[in-house]
Amino acid sequence: MSNLAGVSSTLLEASFFLYLAATILFGGSIRQKGLRDGEGLNRWGKLGIIVTVIGFAAQLGYFFTRWAAAGHAPVSNLFEFTTFFGMMIVGAFILIFFIYKTAVLGLFALPIAIIIIAYASMFPSEISPLIPALQSHWLAIHVTTAAAGQGILGISFIAGLIYLVKNIDQSVSTKKTKWLEAVMFFIVSVIAFILITTGFAAADYKAEFDYVNKEGAAANLEFTVPALVGPNEGSLLTEGKMEPLAEMPAFINAKKLNTVLWSLIGGVVLYVLIRLVTRKRVAALLQPLVQKISSDLLDEIGYRAVLIGFPVFTLGALIFAMIWAQIAWTRFWGWDPKEVWALITFLFYVAFLHLRLSKGWHGEKSAWLAVVGFGIIMFNLVAVNLVIAGLHSYA
Amino acid sequence: MGKVKCECGHVNPNGTILCESCGRALTEEARQEKLVDMRYEGSARRSQTYNKTIIDKVWNFFSSVKVGIWIIVLLLVAASFGTILPQEFYIPSNMPAETYYEDVYGTFGKLYYMIGFHDLYNSVWFSALIAALGVSLVIASLDRVIPLYRALKNQRVDRHESFMKKQRLFAEQSGTLNASELENVKAELIKKRYKVRMENGALLAEKNRFTRWGPYVNHVGLIIFLLGALLRSVPGMYIDELLWIREGETLQVPGTDGTYYVKNNGFTLENYEEGEDPEVFDEAINRVGTVAKNYQTDAVLYRDENNELPGAKPELTEVQSDAIQVNQPMKFDSFAIYQTSFRQDEMKAMHFALTNKATGEEYGEITVDLFDQQKSYELGNGYKVELLGYYPDFDGFTEAGEPTSKSPLPNNPAFLFNMVTPETPEGEVSFAQIRNTMEPLGETVYKMAFKSLDTRDVSALTIRKDLTLPILAIGGIIFMIGVVQGSYWNHRRLWIREKNGQVYVAGHTNKNWHGLKREIHAVLKETSIPEPEDRQKE
């Protein structure tokens, strides 16, 4: 059994590096236009997609071997779900790639998937047994469908992002360039979070605190990065570690806030460094990569991804969710934060579709909406699980 | 209602923008436009035609997609506010909401409670927003679907050239159509699953018209879903009861009017154990501590055969016996019983021994059932214990020295015993708790020594009946069919005609223009018919 789990982890690592390789290959192929009525794919592009498909196959291997090892679909905690979500982005990219043959899409989709998979590995990754509420076939059905929907919707974000990088005028500083930089800063912060967490984990940093929790009871907490902010009435137990600079009230989870602070500081450092070294906005750095692709095509890819992904998302995240909730929690709907945010995501894409159909929000407006939509999906994945406590807090 | 007669002879409803039949522009505005607005085929929508009476105005308000989008956005933003702090139904039930939000979240919590966000989803204004969405769905759909249906049904094959010229995909060329070439094109189009009609030497190829009905189908599904949700408030449609049932107890199933009884034959809580469960879980169990594996109530369901007879004692016959687990409710009729919660080790009975304090000699043991006490317990040989008072949830003494109980639940039972022995025929008073005895009325010779405790578990079962579920399911299925129908196909049309020595080609799709262009290219590339160009390209 544990041998199978070992094979599984190896396959996941392999897929991670294959995606990295594919990104580089797609990088080499961007000279071409990527339109069907123009030239075909060049050799770099072909290699890129082949390596991507192999990587995807490796990750599918990870998924099913882990399933076999655990005895249940590996989508039961944040590590597993987020990894699967990354895989679905790659899968959705492959699907869209075979419709539109655009290499540039891979150049952006794969790094996003890589970041998401790396982010996933910041969470405890051991195989965990299922609590009673999760012991159902609906775990596999509901979660995989919802993640697939989110992955396909993710492609609309990527198409939108490329659209904005290409079309927003970088010669002057405007509100648009600032918002686009905000998106870039967010991505850089996630990378910073991954680097910092990995760094301190490698150094085996552990600082234990006694503190008083929200219910007024004594509790114990272990920080794995130095505590900039400490818990309510906390006292540091581990010797030689950093004392917190400030103490938080009981209803704030100091450990999570501390991680957010580290990510933001790391993000600022990394971002400022990029700006200082290159003397350009991040989006301006990326702009030359995307000049050749048609904006019209990008717009259509973004819209198509929403059209394909929206029904899948609705089926998985609302309809299957309701069926399971009726079985496990006695009611199909209970205004749990995760449910509410799935509904918000649904409503947002409903608004997206109506704005597009009736108000003619194409091109840039549509691209911005796709970026915001993905922001909501990520918020539901990260913040609702980690910050807002509810029935879905499994991590 | 007036009618508009087009030059081609077709009679259109009042308000039509493009003739349903030939496509000529019927309004001055439409004549001026470079490209025609094809969203609803230029059909006559009520909302665009009448605006006089109050009914018109209400209709026009709710038929507007802009208004619909506003309702959606307001709902979305409002819903998000409800997740900032936990809703009232998720806070601990023993804490009143008035103080809970302020106690835990400070001023912000107080404000949150005062605005009413602690129960946002049941608020009148949130319900009103959902109702507005429902009204908008009905009106906006009706306003569009009927004229759209008419327009698509009445469209002719040979559209007027002014209509074709204003399509996004268009080309013209002087020349004539070659009949055999047109036949080839027709054959190619049929291969691509187009329905091809030819009239007066003109060709109309069309496919997937059904996808245009997708939005209306999904709106119908949503309306059914919302109506189903509304039905919940109709008496008899919905039951939601919580039943706390102790091991060994048989209780009436609430919501069944006394027809059904349920017995708790035992509650089980299992955790994952290293060694017993698969080895791959060891690491996780070690990190987390305990991970629950199973919550289970072994339950037996009975029917009361005498329920119809007033005053008769219940006569129970077993209906079914089942292990109720999370994810595996017990089902009967339209009811389901769920494992919802539990309380372990509730005190059931206490054992005391009448003991001589000096010698430690015991003169018999009594068992006090915490749910069924006796007035006095005979021990024989002149020894007996009288129960003077029972305080299930002992909370201290009043100023007058009276013991008090803060609830009827046996959380901290205490007893006032009168011990009668041959030595003390008047009796001595002992106040006994778990591991503690007191002598409130002066020193005694005997005491009631606590011996042991019997406990049992209590299961919380949810009893649920929801007759709206089939309606919601139908609504959900229709919604999904509509969404898929509207999303996964495209309504494509290609017009080819010749007039006065000019060949006109035009194409239209409701979405995915690249796909249409690729398809037209494949069909026309080997022919002399010009390929239409996209006139909306950047």
Image (tube, rainbow, N blue to C red):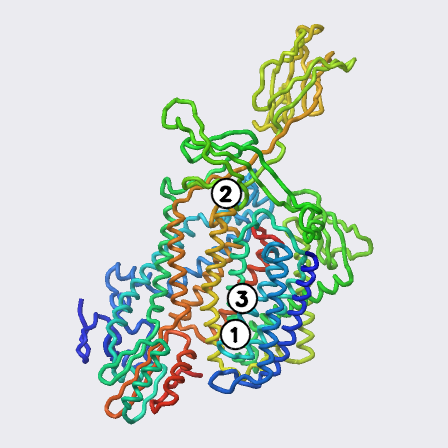
> Which amino acid type is shown beneath numbered disc 3?
Gly
Residue sitting at x 70%, y 61% = A6
Whether residues under marks 3 and 1 lie with C-beta atoms below 8 angstroms apart, the answer is no
Q: CA distance from mark 2 to mark 3?
A: 33 Å
Residue beneath disc 2: B329
Expressed as whole percent of the image width and height from the top left, the position of residue A20 reads 65, 74
Q: Earlier in the sequence, mark 3 or mark 1?
A: 3
Query: What chain is tagged by disc 1?
Result: A
Q: Is residue A167 found left or right of B275 in the rendered image?
A: left
Q: Is residue B320 found left or right of B368 in the rendered image?
A: left
Q: Residues within 10 Å of mark 1 (few under 14, many from 20)?
A: many
Q: Looking at the image, can residue B188 be seen?
A: yes
The residue closer to the viewer here, B97 or A326, is: A326
Whether residues under marks 2 and 3 lie with C-beta atoms below 8 angstroms apart, the answer is no
- Label 2 secondary element: loop
Residue beneath disc 3: A151
The residue closer to the viewer here, A333 or B442, is: A333
Q: Is residue A137 above or below residue B361?
A: below
Expressed as whole percent of the image width and height from the top left, the position of residue A310 reads 46, 65
Q: CA distance from mark 3 to mark 1?
A: 13 Å
The label nearer to you, 3 versus 1, is: 3
- Label 1 secondary element: helix
- Label 3 secondary element: helix
Query: What chain is tagged by disc 2?
Result: B
Q: Is residue A49 found left or right of B320 in the rendered image?
A: right
> Which amino acid type is shown beneath numbered disc 2?
Pro
Question: Which quadrant of the view contains residue B297?
Answer: top right
Residue beneath disc 1: A159
